[in-house]
Amino acid sequence: MQAHLLSLLIWLPILGGVLLLGIGDCAGKSAGRRLATVRRLVTVRRLALGFALAVFVLSVPLYTQFDTHTAAMQFGEHHIWVRAFNIHYSLGVDGISMPLILLTTLLTVLVVIAGWKVIRARVAQYMAAFLIMEGLMIGVFAALDAVLFYVFWEAMLIPMFFIIGVWGGPNRIYAAIKFFLYTLLGSLLMLVALLYLYHLSGGSFRILDYHQMQLALTPQVWVFLAFFAAFAVKVPMFPVHTWLPDAHVEAPTGGSVILAAVMLKMGGYGFIRFNLPITPDASQELAWMMIGLSLIAVVYIALVALAQRDMKKLIAYSSISHMGFVTLGLFVFNPYGLEGALLQMISHGLISAALFLCVGVLYDRMHSRMLETYGGLATPMPVFATFMVLFAMANCGLPGTSGFVGEFLVILGAFQANAWFAAVAALTLIFGAAYTLWMVKRVIYGKVASPQVAALADVEPREIVVLAVLAALVLLVGVWPNPLLEVMHASTDNLLQHIAVSKLP
Amino acid sequence: MNFASLNAAAARAEIFLAVAACAILLLGVYGDQARRAARCYGLSLVALVIAALLNGLDFSAANGSAFNHMFIADPMAKLLKIAICVLSAAAFVYGRQYNRHRGIFESEYYVLGLFAVTGMLVMASANHLLTLYLGLELMSLCLYAMIAYYRDDRLATEAAMKYFVLGALASSMLLYGMSLLYGFTGSLQLSVISSVLTADAATAAQPQAAIALAVVFIVVALAFKLGVAPFHMWVPDVYHGAPTSTTAFLSAAPKIAAFAITMRLIVGGLNALPDIWQQMLILLALLSVAIGNIIAIAQRNLKRMLAYSTVAHMGFFLFGIASGNAPGYSAALFYVLIYALMGLGAFGVILMLARPEYEADQLADLKGLSKRNPWLAFLLLLLMLSMAGLPPTVGFFAKLAVIHALVQSGLLWVAVLAVLLAVIGAFYYLRVIKLVYFDQPPSADPATAAQTTTTITEGDIAVSPAAILLLSCNVLAIIALLPWIHYLIAICNEVIRRFAV
């Protein structure tokens, strides 16, 4: 069981997705078939939830049976796939990827619940897209073979392309194609870098082999830049972030949640798995660039967020700003920075997902994301207001929430490297508080904006479940981050030792 | 020389097919129009399948040769011939209904197709400049006729005329290059040419510039035949103007035959002169991928768009040859096989969508296809993803193999340019997916409903289930082959390893 656990986690949701596609949505158009169609809809939703829950439950042993004392890959599985190119079907997790897999499985369950009543068109395809994407995302985090990683990495774009393009807003086609082409451009450069490494390593696609490989500085810099093209787009770092606000605004709520909570993390994960260990010298050499871009993201994008009237856009820019902390933490090369970055990835995954879900709750009721539509929501929707304020506080990094732990550790790490980095990064605590609180003030408090707002129904049990799970986790990680840090510790230590050793021949 | 020393058995597939085609032509004279067509169609398929089987599946057999070494039967020829026969048979199946609705004289059509296939088989086995030319012309002449099959159609006639004039020009260039080559080496046999050139290169006996002239003529002629930029002008017109059934036929097997002559001539005959042809091929390939991908974006006609996409794909396949090493040739072979599968599938989908009086070849015709015909929409999705080279499809592995070969021969910058141009290509494939899945069917729009509803309502004419089944297998192979992809790559490697020079 343990030997095939990762395979199961990857293929079970994909199988579920294909099954849902096979069942389909519509039993027929005639009036007599109406009932059959409705019944089928119910089956589809239940099946989707069943698969998502099953995958989540199956992923729990990854945590409970995880050996925290070793940095080695666990739950490994290795088969040869394409002998001619020495490509392996090779899976495994360490303390860096395992929490991200759990985040993926958890959020997929929440997204399925969140889309339960809201999605009415092509329900089976919608659910199938999320399940298939779940499998592919787990594959990205678990792949230990470069080509296998690439296959999952690219394939994952396809369901997301559909989610934005089919169920998105008015400008969805522009957003979907922009999202796809941006990511593809970066990824293909990474592919060339991988083939180059394959050639240099004498015919190996194993990522862990690349970690041990000697490499002169010039090729290191080129390989670094090629990986940078792929991962910086995904994070997204300034100045290649422009696809994100478009994609987020147009995507349906579930799409935004997965995009912000999991897909952006893949950029950070890529830096940790590829750039830092494969090209450590180039990473040191180019750290000024990475830190500079991160600080620009942290400060400048926070200011951009301040100017938004569309809530989803605001949260999207806030995501970019928060992801700046992740890249900052990675390139100060100390334990605080690295662990802070990892924790920030998890924490941002929870908080941004929650905020997008909150906007989704409002959008489902009012069909508007504009700040000026709302006001005084605390009166008609007290329960919702409580949740929203909690997540907003977490987004500003209030102590006691998960947002604080990650940002604090990263600032601590930045301080060790250079006090000025920390000073600039800490500015975001002010700006972040400004735009978040301003949003909360305008949406939740103040006078009730209109009769429609006054008549809004509060969150229903389905929505409460989703928000409550996230709220609990945000508080848990904020108060007691140790269970997460413990899991990561061995891997981050190992990574830092690895980076400290020069790989120049 | 007695008959046995000709070793004609090595050419049994070609001989069988030529005889079968003649017999089918005769049988097509009797009976009424419909029965004649059905008989010729059925018999042609049987003939193609038998011709494929005659090659056998044993890729480890020793190389044979026939007709005094003018003709060789090596594993590469065997593999290519099987692919040519099978893909041509599939093209006939897809095009059958289209032909029937348009009153095309089917019996002659299939016979022409069989002769074209015979030409392609000869090309695959050519070891002599004359054999090669013979096969090439046999194929081309049949194709001209198949393209001009709507003789009253302005576009089809123009396409055939263009193809004929340019094809003749290319053939004359090929002949001129061959004659120069004969002057330098004193032989028309490729293996002799190769060894003479190798010996000459070692002693620097011949002036390089003069040989380069011969190589230029040959490469230009091949570029015409392959349809790579800047010699691609005929491709969009022919793809667009020809009946779709012919376009489908053109898009698969002739590409494989073109690969065969490129391998035989460039790698088999001119292997001593990589310095001369490598740069030319790289330039041609880069231009093709750039021009094909960029101009495809501007197309409104699906057949034209796919034609430019073919130009780009031929460029990509040429990268494999241009990398000038065994992995490169193997990658090119793999690429061209996969491409033939995808190209045939794409035109197959258009053929399935076509109705009498309705060609379904405008991009706008695809709007909302996922609502009208979810299964064909899904097949088209797979095809577009695979053509764009996205995992998890075999199209990705084809591109991977080619880029890998480029990196391995140190052409890193070419590899980077190639992938950047592939991103441009992804745009128009995505646009097809957008039309199919994101847009609403046109009949919802009252302005166009009057023109279209009468023609694209599903169910007015049942599409042949056999054709749909075959098309589904063809397209699903793009994704279903993945777990077994290494067998295919291993066969390609083995075949190239034993490529007889």
Image (cartoon, rainbow, N blue to C red):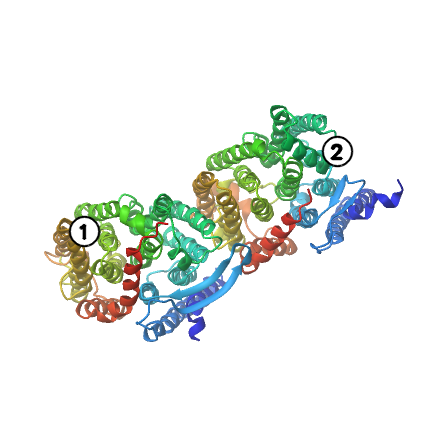
| Residue contact between numbered discs 1 and 2, judged by CB atoms under 8 Å | no
Residue reaching furthest left?
A446
Residue reaching furthest right?
B2
Looking at the rendered image, the quarter that the N terminus of chain A falls into is bottom left
Q: Residue at x 59, y 44 (%)?
A: B329
Local packing at callout 2 (Cα closer than 10 Å; few below 14, some 14-19, many 20+) is: some
Which element type, helix, strand or loop, lies under badge 2?
A: helix
Is residue B156 in sight in this rendering? no
Chain letter of the residue carrying label 1 = A
Q: Inspect the image, locate mark 1, and give the three-letter code of the amino acid beneath it.
A: Leu
Q: Where does label 1 land, which residue?
A: A371
Q: Where does label 2 land, which residue?
A: B130
Which element type, helix, strand or loop, lies under badge 1?
A: helix
Picture coordinates of residue B90 (x, y %)? 66, 50
Chain letter of the residue carrying label 2 = B
Say which of B53 and B60 sits in front: B60
